[in-house]
Image (cartoon, helix red, strand yellow):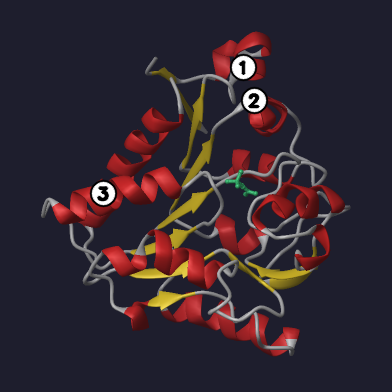
């Protein structure tokens, strides 16, 4: 696992934007695994900037998003489908038919999860998967559990994730309680993984993910098994790792 320490959110976004742009440049028809949340917004802004300057094109790219809330329509401004349009897709030249996201409106979980796994398989797998990390160490909506999840599945969100997401909704009872998410095995199938973290509330998760044991109580710890995982964390998010296991930080940009 390569761990890059950066100054702040802006530097994290800039470095991540460069890595994704490099991926798109060397393989214009690559498959990007994308994530939602506050963390990747700056990275998407960097990619939009590069597209507008004519440095990169997404015309041949395909995308597969990590997750989507269950029971929510793509027109709902809290859906991840809406988020992706708003923060990236509508600003670049990606073809709408090249973008994929679980269908939160399909009530048949088995059918939807099989469909989504099939979509990823038909794309030939994900080349680069972008990830955030939950305060509790979740990746996608793979929450701390007794065992690691495998393929795309429907998941009940934990109280801590519902609390963290309440800030986006008018009230806590409006936060969806379930989601469809790529499983841990689906995520680990990506050729490269790029996990971003910013802010003090991620410090414990980053420390345990990088330096702790691989265990399903800390879902992101499984990334230690991936052959090409890059973590970019800012000063606040890397604080505990820096204090307790600085030897695990591979590159310091700040
Ligand atoms: P955040 O969420 O980017 O909004 O902090 C990250 C996550 O839950 O994966």
- Report the residue marked by disc 1: 239
**Image quarter hosting the C terminus:** top left
- Report the residue marked by disc 3: 21
Relative to 45, 40 lies left or right: right
Q: What is the x, y in percent for residue 138? A: 70, 48
Dot 3 alpha-carbon crowd within 10 angstroms: few under 14, some 14 to 19, many 20 or more: many
| Residue sitting nearer the eye, 68 or 250 | 68
Relative to 7, 178 lies left or right: right
At horizontal 67% and vertical 63% (from top left) the residue drawn is 183
Marks 1 and 2: CB-CB under 8 Å? Answer: yes
Q: Is residue 206 visible?
A: no
Give residue 98's quadrant in the image.
bottom left
Q: Callout 3: helix, strand or loop?
A: helix
- In the image, residue 102 above or below residue 245: below
Q: Callout 1: helix, strand or loop?
A: helix
Dot 1 alpha-carbon crowd within 10 angstroms: few under 14, some 14 to 19, many 20 or more: many
| Residue sitting nearer the eye, 42 or 114 | 42
The tag earlier along the polypeptide, 3 or 2, is 3
The tag earlier along the polypeptide, 1 or 2, is 2
- In the image, residue 143 above or below residue 243: below
Q: Is residue 190 visible?
A: yes
Dot 2 alpha-carbon crowd within 10 angstroms: few under 14, some 14 to 19, many 20 or more: some
- Report the residue marked by disc 2: 200
Residue most extreme to the front: 170
At horizontal 77% and vertical 69% (from top left) the residue drawn is 178
| Residue sitting nearer the eye, 235 or 213 | 235
Q: CA distance from mark 1 to mark 2?
A: 8 Å
- In the image, residue 243 above or below residue 165: above
């Amino acid at each position: 696992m390569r761990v890059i320490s950066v100054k702040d959110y802006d530097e994290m976004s800039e470095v991540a934007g460069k890595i994704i742009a490099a991926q798109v440049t060397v393989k214009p028809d690559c498959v990007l695994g994308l994530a939602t949340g506050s963390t990747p917004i700056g990275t998407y802004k960097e990619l939009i900037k590069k597209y507008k300057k004519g440095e990169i094109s997404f015309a041949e790219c395909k995308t597969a998003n990590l997750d989507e809330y269950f029971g929510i329509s793509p027109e709902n401004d809290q859906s991840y489908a809406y988020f992706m349009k708003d923060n990236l897709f509508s600003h670049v030249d990606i073809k709408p038919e090249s973008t994929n996201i679980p269908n939160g409106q399909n009530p048949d979980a088995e059918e939807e999860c099989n469909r989504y796994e099939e979509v990823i398989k038909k794309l030939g797998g994900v080349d680069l998967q972008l990830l955030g990390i939950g305060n509790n160490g979740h990746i996608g909506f793979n929450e701390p559990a007794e065992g690691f999840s495998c393929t795309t599945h429907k998941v009940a969100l934990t109280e801590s994730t519902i609390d963290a997401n309440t800030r986006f909704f008018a009230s806590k009872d409006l936060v969806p309680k379930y989601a469809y998410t790529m499983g841990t095995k689906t995520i680990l199938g990506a050729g490269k993984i790029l996990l971003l973290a910013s802010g003090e509330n991620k410090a414990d998760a980053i420390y345990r993910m990088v330096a702790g044991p691989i265990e399903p109580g800390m879902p992101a710890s499984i990334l230690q098994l991936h052959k090409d995982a890059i973590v970019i964390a800012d000063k606040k998010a890397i604080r505990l790792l820096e204090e307790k296991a600085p030897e695990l930080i591979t590159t310091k940009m700040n």
